[in-house]
Amino acid sequence: MVGGLTAANVGEELTLAGWVHRRRDLGGLLFVDLRDRSGLLQVSFGPDWTSEEGLLLARELGPEDVVAVSGMVALRPDPNPQMPTGAVELRAGSVERLSVARTPAIPVYRGPEDELPSEDLRLRHRVLDLRRPELQRALGLRHRVVLAARNYLDGLGFMEIETPILTRPTPEGARDYLVPSRVHKGEFYALPQSPQIYKQILMVSGYDRYFQIARCFRDEDLRADRQPEFTQIDVEASFVGVDDVLRWIEGLVVAICDVVGMHVELPLPSLSWADAMERYGTDRPDLRFGLPIEDWSSVVLETEFRVLRGPVEVGGRARGIRLPGGARLSRKDIEAIEEEAKAAGAPGLAWVKLGDEGASGPLGKHLSEAHLAEMGMKAGDLALVAAGPDRVTSPALSATRMAAAAALGTPRERDHAWLWVTGFPVFEETDGGGLVPGHHPFVMPHPEDIDLLESDPARTRGLAYDLVYNGTELGSGSIRIHRPDLQRTVLRMLGLSDVDIDRKFGFLLEALSAGAPPHGGIALGVDRIAQRFVGAGSIRDVIAFPKTTAARALFEGAPSPLGDEELTELGLRLVTRAPTP
RNA sequence: GGGGCUGUAGCUCAGUCGGUUAGAGUGCCGGUCUGUCACACCGGAGGUCGCGAGUUCGAGUCUCGUCAGCCCCGCCA
């Protein structure tokens, strides 16, 4: 390992192997930066200490050649304080070339002002891209996060158990990746969207503390933080309530944050889903800064400002955000924020600035001093207001809040805002009036709301919780239903017939009938955690071999067409043939 | 499924109003150079302007289509 050498090693005779990172040929003297996973070390070649063959070979070395160099560690006459090993160098006596590299298609070395190659080239030449120190650091950090999680959970008596990758298609939720069965032609396995049902069955079987670093697969369209396959720290325990899970997982958060030296105060703050939606307009608020949403419906009703007043009169609310110091934003800045709100579904934003000469802006002339006082407006403030039903204004004001904080450069009150959001609704209403699961169909309804389940299902809270960090959902879990009759009721509410329930969830209901302990758990997104911890722009930078946004693997070339022979063996015939490349 | 951005030398990019032989930096090849560290200096090679149509006397540049990558909406129980 080359990266750890210091002045303490001076005088040692060593043979070091690695890749040629960069070469500087001065004629009589020649320098090579040797790279391995641990870092860089300068190797010097000169007629006074290098063999003649060594000098000849050194002259021929190209970037990314693999070499073994034998020589002595020496102090440098001119140390390089920029390099961790910059005080010393290896004076090469001899050198052996273990492997010749073709001129790299994309550079591994990157100068201080060089841009990264485009992402498709980085993915196509992943073998080279993965050599970059940044990616090696990212994957190393990811490894330590997972290792910390394993050690922590093992210390609490959790047992790692693998569950199948070839499994049964699930009726609800994301699209499944399907695998044809050769033995049973016309039948298919599915890759798991998560080990959810398996881990519940493990609870029933008495494995009362389970975890798994689990690969999950979902055939849906991708984003910067979404890949078709991703990894979760999947946890489940028996005889637990919400608080047990939260306290255990807080310990896990501390353990993985320790990897990056991030301090975490326990217990983590907690917000009900209803409060999160009311005050921040989203179920995953970024609490690095304040700027809560406030209800100004009563103020609006006292004005003649029809744009806001109208929606309130028909049952909506006028809510908004007061931005201290926001009056210095230009009309153009405010319009840019309004665009964000519109993109999130709002018809528009009204606003009022309070300057030295009084209130201005579309809303300004409609407000009295008393109104402004009621809104808490102080000189220099800006208020942005949206009116309508909460289901429209909440997402719009959430977008407004984020855009306004960015435009204003709102100072952060903290750099790391961890948060529990609890009490998610069991169901969400679809536009067609039907019900879909808020999370998944196995969430235990809140005991206080059990009466609402059939009378007012949309208001039923579940014993469900999300772990949120800086506005990103990093984990999601719940206490599960362990009574088969209640599970059947919930599935019926979702519009499933008893026949369907038995066909699709029969094995779960049968398991729950075998003496099921109360149980619950959570799953944390490893890729997203690693992404946040390394500050990467996408989870592709913390995955060794990621897919593109079109779910292609550019390096190995997946997916790929199948020949007729293979198709026949699987009992398949194509309706659409892939274009021949 | 929809919207947006990008595609020019191995890589990163520039390319004016549609007009002569498409440029720069870096890398690569050859040469000089004994303390460099983005070494320096001299010389050279390197182009299907993503692909296909169209408009035009003339297209890297305009139009349409298409492919690829990225970002977003829908979707992701």
Image (cartoon, coloured by chain):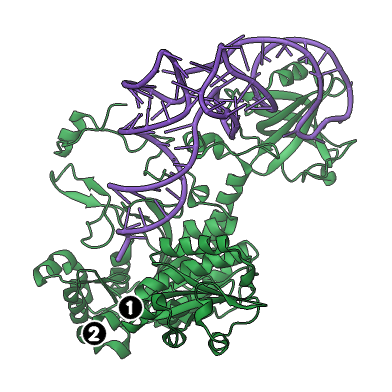
Chain colours: A green, B purple
Residue A144 visible from this viewpoint: yes
Residue A215, image x and y in percent?
38, 55
Residue furthest out toward the right: A77
Residue A226, image x and y in percent?
42, 54
- The residue at which mark 2 appears reads as A456
Residue A29, image x and y in percent?
83, 23
Asked whether the residues under marks 2 and 1 belong to the same chain, the reply is yes
How packed mark 2 is, by other alpha carbons closer than 10 Å (few <14, some 14-19, many 20 or more), is few
Left or right of A11? Residue A100 is left
For the point 46% across and 83% down, the residue is A295
For the point 69% across and 39% down, the residue is A113
Residue A293 visible from this viewpoint: no
Q: Quadrant of residue B43?
A: top right
How packed mark 1 is, by other alpha carbons closer than 10 Å (few <14, some 14-19, many 20 or more), is many
Q: Quadrant of residue A369?
A: bottom right
Q: Amino acid at mark 1?
A: Pro
Secondary structure of residue under mark 2: loop
- Quarter of the image containing the N terminus of chain A? top right
Measured in 3D between alpha carbons, the distance from the residue under mark 2 to the one under mark 1, in whole angstroms, is 11 Å
- The residue at which mark 1 appears reads as A425
Q: Which mark is residue A150?
A: none
